[in-house]
Image: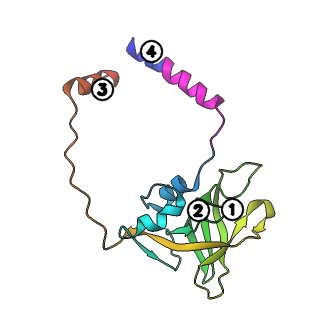
Amino acid sequence: MFIKGLKKTVLALGLMSVAAPALALQCVPYARETSGVEIFGNARTWWGQAAGRYERGYAPKVGAVMAFKPTRSMPIGHVATVSQIVSEREVLVSHANWSLINGRRGQIERNVRVVDVSESGDWSKVKVWYAPLKDLGTSSYPLFGFIYNKPGAAAAPAAPREPLSLPADTLRLATLEAGA
């Protein structure tokens, strides 16, 4: 009886999710997922949060997070994951919520061009591919730098955790629901 009720609930939730409009994907969870860098919060905070936890630098590497500084038009910053090095001044990145695609933000773009346009070639300012133009955008954006997806030497070791223990009733219920 419980299983039949559970199946109806799951079916109803599934139908509700199909009818609900898709939500826009933000850059932060996408960068976290694609880079393995476990930082949370607005993109503008990633550079500071990475200090002492991850290596940081000013040269792109595959898998690194490109951390954009906040600007007037982008007050919470932006993060993207480097997917390929093309040359000393060009990389490809994968990111979310940059270009308008089919009139909507929140889309994922994979392997799009980013070009270093800084005067000294130090990756302090970039231009980014913008889908509606089918070219690099007209604006340039300042970068903090790159957060490398390997923990830094100063990273504190994780605190030991107690083994997970579940009450016997919870385990018994899980066994019954699984049909065992």
Q: Residues within 10 Å of mark 4 (few under 14, many from 20)?
A: few
Along the line of sight, the residue nearer the viewer: 93 or 122:
122
- Residue at label 1? 73
Q: Are marks 4 and 3 in contact (CB under 8 Å)?
A: no
**Residue that badge 3 annotates:** 174
Rounded to the nearest angstrom, the CA distance separating label 3 from label 1 is 50 Å
Where is residue 36, by image quadrant?
bottom left
How many numbered marks, from 0 up? 4
Kindly report the distance in space between the C-alpha atoms of the residues bearing marks 4 and 1. Answer: 49 Å
Task: Categorize mark 1 by other alpha carbons within 10 Å: few (<14), some (14-19), many (20+).
Answer: few
Quadrant of the rendering where the N terminus is positioned? top left
Q: Residue at x 53, y 60 (%)?
A: 43
Question: Which of label 4 and label 1 is nearer to you?
Answer: 1
Tell me the residue that label 4 is attached to. 5
**Residue 77, numbered label:** 2
Mark-to-mark CA distance, 4 and 3: 16 Å
Q: Quadrant of the C terminus?
A: top left
Going from N to C along the chain, the mark reached first, 4 or 3, is 4
**Kind of residue at disc 1:** Ser
Per the model, the C-alpha gap separating discs 4 and 2 is: 45 Å
Kind of element beneath mark 3: helix
In the image, what residue type sits under mark 3?
Ala
- How far is the residue under mark 2 from the one under mark 3? 44 Å
User: Left or right of 43: which side holds 154?
Assistant: left
